[in-house]
Every structure is written in C-alpha cells, then in structure tokens.
Image (tube, grey):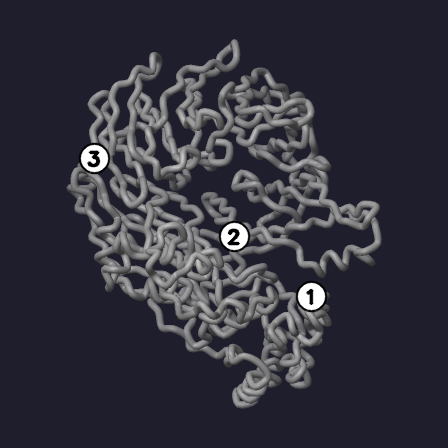
Amino acid sequence: MSDEIFQDMARQMRPSDPTRQALFQALAQEGPANSAPNGSPDVARRRIKRPKRARILGLPRRLVTPLAATVAAAAMVSVALLPAVPWANQALRGDQDGSALGGRTAPAREATVTAAGYDQVYQAVETIFWHNGVYGKVNGLRDIATGLFSGDWLQGQVMPEYSAMSQADSTTVGSVAADAYTATNTQVEGIDEGDVVKTDGQLIFAAAEQYVTILRAAGADTEVVSKIDVADIFTAMSQDDDLTSPDSVAYSQVIDLLIYDNVLVVLIASSQYGYGIVDHESDVTEDDLLAGTAAGDQTVTLIYDVSQPTTPRHLTTLAQSGYYTTSRLLDGTLYVVTNHSLWDIGRIDPAKPGSYVPCVADPDGTEPIPVDDISLLPDPASPSYAVATATDLKTGQRIGQEAILGGAETVYLTASNLYLAGTRWVDPEDWDQATADPEVPQAVAAVSSTKTDLVRISLDDADLSVSAQTTVDGRLLNQFSLDEFEGYLRLVTTSDSWVADETGVALSEPFARLEILNPSLVQVGSIDQLVTNESVQAVRFIGQTGYVVTFRQVDPLFAIDLKDPTTPRVLSALKIPGFSTYLHPWGEGLLLGLGQSATDDGAITGLKLSMFDISDPAAVSEVASLALEGLDHSSALNDHHAILVDQPNNLIGFGGGSWETMANDYWVYSYGPDGFEISASLPGPELDYEYSWYGETIRGIRIGDDLYVCSSNETRVYSIGLFDTLTTLEY
C-alpha cells in the first residue's frame, strides 16, 4: 500500500472532534483540569523560508493510556503498525493507579509521524511532563510574573527597525591583515565563535556586565574611544521601564561578542527574576528561584554599526527564547543557539502556542516559531528546546530558524551543516531490558547510562532544515568530540558499562568509544571500546587522524587512523602521568597539550604543558613537558577561547592562578629546542569585592608587536619580548 492510503485510513478512523471533546471532558472529571483539548490555532506569520512540515524524528516510546484505549477500536489499524512499546504496561514507575501523577493517567501521543499544526507539539510537550511525573506539581507559581517560557516578555517589546550602514560609513575603518593579530581561538578555520573579547586588528571590544568597551589598539597610545550600555536599548524596547530598571527583577548581561567588517554583534543573556539579583522586596522567593520556575530566559542580539567607533550606532535588535548556548559566524551569517526550557505545565495553554513553543522577535513583531520549523526528537528527556537561528548581518534580517524539542548542549558548525547534540540518561526501562533481574548480582556489558541525541541541520544558504537524526551511546565531552571530514561525521563519547558487585549494587565503569557516521547519520565504522575504565578528557581531529586523551591514573593519548571510515584503527597509545584537557596543532608534526599533571597513582598536582611529536601517528611521543608550579587552575582547561596559541610568534598564553594565593594572573610561555620556557607572569586585574577571583575572564590578544591582556574592568598593554608595561586602561 502507498503512504497515501495509510494516511487516508488514519483520517477516517480518527474520532470526530465532538467525540474527542467528550473524551477530554470525561477525563477532566476524573482529575485536574489540565487536560484541555489539544487543538490550538495556527498563528499567522511572515514566511522566511520554504514550507516544511513538523517532524517527529523517529517514533516515540510512550505509555499506552486509558484515553488511547478508549479510541483504540477506531485506531486499531494505525496502532498495529507501530513498533512494540517496551514499557506500555508500566505506570511511570509509580503506583499502578497513577498516583505518581496525582491520580491521573498519562495521555498518549497520536500515532502519526507528521503534524499539520501546533496540537501535535503540545501533545509531545504534555507527554514529556507526564513521563517525568511532574504534571501539576509546580503550577502553583503560575501567577508569579510572566516569564519568557510563555513568550509574553518578548511580545511586550518593540524591536527597532534595521538602519543600514551607508557606503561611506562602511569604509571608515580599514582592514588589517589576518596574520597581524590573533583572533579568537576557534575549532573550525573560517568559522568565528562568540567570545567576551574580540578584535579586528585595530579595535578591541571587551564585554563586562551590561557594557561593551571599545578601545583603539595603538600600543602605548591605546585609548578607550566609547562605551555601549545595553541597558539603554532595553529601556527603549520595553513598554514598562520598570522591567529593565537596575532595581527591578529584570537582568541583562552581555555574554558574547562577534565582529564582522564594521558590524558589531552583542549577544545578551536576559532573565526575569534572574537568580542572585532579585529585588528582595518582590513577591519572588528564594524557594521560587531555586525551583527554577520563576526564571524566564531570552537571548537578545543587538547589532551595531561601528564604522565610527567613537559613536557606535545601534542598527537593530533580534531576540529568541532560551538561555544562550553559543554562537557562530560564517560568511556574514550569524548563527545563535539557545536552550528554551518549560518548567511549569500549569503555565501552558494549548490555545496559545507561545506558552509551549519558543518565540522569536524582530522589528516586524514577535511570534512563536512556526510549526513547520519545529522538530520532535523521538524520546526527549525534558521539555526543552534547542533553538537555532540564522541572521544575515548585511541586512539585519533573520533568514532561518529551527527548534528541536529535546534540547541540546553541544554545538558544532561546519561550512554546510549545524550539528546539535543533547545528552540524556537512559530510561530505567532500558536497564530492565538489559538485566533479567536487577536484584541479582551480574555483569551487564556495554549498557550506557547516557545516550546522545544528534541532529544534523543543513545550512542550505542559512535556510535551516533538519536533514538527519540519530542516537548514539554515551556522552560527548565538548564540541571537539565532533568532526566532519569528507562527508563523514567522526565522534568520540564516554559510555558506561554497568557491573553489579557481590551485593547487587550497580557500579559504573566508563569506557571511550569512537563512531563514524555517514551523511544520514548511520554508523559505517566504530571502535566500540577504545579503552576501558577511563573517561575521555580531550579530543582533536586532524585530517585523517584522530587524537583522544583518556584518564584514570595515567594519560593515554591515542592516535587513530581514520583513512577508511569503515575500519578505524588505533595506531598508537602513549601513556604518561597526568592528562591533557585541550589539544592544539603546533606547526607541522607537533601537538600542544594543556592539562593536569598527576602522580603515577593519579593524584592531580597542578597544571601541565605537553608537546607531542605526531609526525608518525604510529609512534607518538611526548618530546617536552612542563609542570606549571604554583598554577592550580585555569579557565583554559575547559574553555578553548581562554587560551592564546600563536605558533608563528611562539606565544602560548592563558590566565591562571593558585588556590592558596587566590591570584588569577596571565601567564605567557614559549616553546623551543629546549622545551617550554616561561616568558612572563603578568599581574591579573584588581577585582572589586563583588567579583569571584576564579570567575574572572582574562583574554590575551596579540596585535603587531604588542600583547593586550583584557579583563572585565581593564586592559593592560605589554611589549612582546621584554613584556614591559606600555599602558593600563581601566573602564
């Protein structure tokens, strides 16, 4: 039979609207009135891309409920076509009468793969809440001030129209050769990443709290030329000035910057009732904040013309629901990814898509993301969305958007694809399937406690469109765990094998694994257990070779041959004390590592620099190492933006300090025939008492022959070589 026949059968067997209304009314009489009909109106919108239909990326595994049983006779053929649901006869690990859900039974998802409206999205969201057993538990806070998860805050703002730069303005600031300065350390060549400090070789842009300071880089003559206060924009956007008052519960902070030609992008994390800055005389209590139900998050994109840096001109404002995850800049197109969570089903109205669907805003208004731009993961662990948008910085227009119900915390962008990955715990049902009796001591081989949902979104001229989806075992370390090469996606995860001890207690033993997927995200090759009882600490792919660091007591650095995607193989495994958490190519045949030094027993003793000879991947060796005495911590261990790697000028720089002295200075090293040498220890910023020393952000930038060390409240300029202080500017 054709798909059209099955679709026609499904339509004929679907209960009529009056029948469905009666069923919902009957259900409402048995429990709380949160089970309103799911039909919700489509929202008119300005189309920005070709039509698509909402997708369910695979078939869901959800409970069969009394409601589903009621209509089973009418939908018998459709239900028969579904795969077996492994936990159809279980009651969400609660009492069989549904007491875990307040006396109600969970609604079932309809047996369809595509949806024509928001109703299917609502059903998916409702089912997640039911599955998590939290339906109605937190809806007592629904009357607390409106949060962004309902979309109302965005809808209360007026986004200024885009004011394009004139041709004369666009040439005011000249360009500087790329090798004359160091840009942000990024993963993919040609793709920029947002960071708190940016430069174009002439200007430096430094973000701190609600400000962006613009400096003209000129060595000893460096000067602050202007300062942007984003609170001014928020006051103009809001219909209620109190919403953005410093004394109110609204909070906005510049979190990242990007620069493209003479266009400055300022990315802002905004929250209503942001934790830690609440007006304590308001009705919002600490318990509300800790519960996470009073936090309405949005990410705002401000675009400025900085061709006249002394008077930066605001061009337009865009916004999207969710807390900021990351951003990318590729060929003049800005990609912003956020995570939008739904905390309280009591705030969700099936008749208002903006209450359960992320919203976007631009000068034309605010709207829920249209249903044809929403994809549903087959088994999302939480009611959260990954929201990706694409904006043309030449016009200030949003040109693409996509929302994935299921969320994502890892983002990887190539010239043609955007990958979103989200980790979730394996359902208890999977444990039951893997063990005949969980109470009986036994080993359970290769049952990962985490899985990663992976989505490939085709850029297609920034017209974002989901092209493939899969689920892999284990969890990614970070974006460097993903790499696309010649059409294949290589990835490294840490999985867990569960072993029951003699008492029956399950113990987790981590192991590293590598997979290679084709463009459809189907596995074509793998190394199922790269090493046992060790977790992944660092990954770097360089062409046809992958380098993976794992750790338990010593640091195995694996070199993996990836020439044939179907048969990856380990070429060598170098074991040394300690481990690297970041790997960076250093010229031809060398690999730089920054990480932790450790004893032979695995006790961490401080920071460490390593240089590996990878000229022969089958015989990798450590040719130099330096234990960094007095350094216990550095943000560069976990944030690659925080490290300066300038191999042509022999500079390695990052902020770091000691737990004892509470210092956070900037350290500069070089590498030569005799190994690593310290070039300078430069004093860190003097912090106000309000700041935490370990949370201070420090960035180093080389422009010409000078090193600029930037923090939230000052920039210090040094001459490279002697590292004499040329000037210090506070702001």
Q: CA distance from mark 2 to mark 1?
A: 26 Å
Amino acid type, callout 3: Val
Q: Which mark is residue 408?
A: 2
User: In the shown orientation, is residue 730 left or right of residue 335?
Assistant: left
> In the picture shown, does residue 540 fall above or below 526?
above
Nearer-the-camera pick, 24 or 623: 24
Instruction: Determine the image quadrant of residue 168.
Output: top left
Total label count?
A: 3
Q: CA distance from mark 1 to mark 3?
A: 63 Å
Q: CA distance from mark 2 to mark 3?
A: 38 Å
Q: Which mark is residue 281?
A: none
Crowd band around label 2 with a 10 angstrom C-alpha radius: few (<14), some (14–19), many (20+): many
Q: Which mark is residue 93?
A: 1
**Residue 626 coordinates in the image, percent (x, y):** 54, 17
- Looking at the rendered image, the disc whose residue lies closer to the viewer, 1 or 3, is 1
Q: Are marks 1 and 3 in contact (CB under 8 Å)?
A: no
Amino acid type, callout 2: Ala
**Residue at the spot 57% in from the left edge and 81% down from the top edge:** 31
User: In the shown orientation, is residue 255 left or right of residue 414?
Assistant: left
Q: Which mark is residue 173?
A: 3
Nearer-the-camera pick, 162 or 581: 581
- Looking at the rendered image, the disc whose residue lies closer to the viewer, 2 or 1, is 1
On-image quarter of the N terminus: bottom right
Q: Is residue 200 visible?
A: yes
**Residue at the spot 83% in from the left edge and 49% down from the top edge:** 442
**Residue 297 coordinates in the image, percent (x, y):** 40, 56
Crowd band around label 1 with a 10 angstrom C-alpha radius: few (<14), some (14–19), many (20+): few
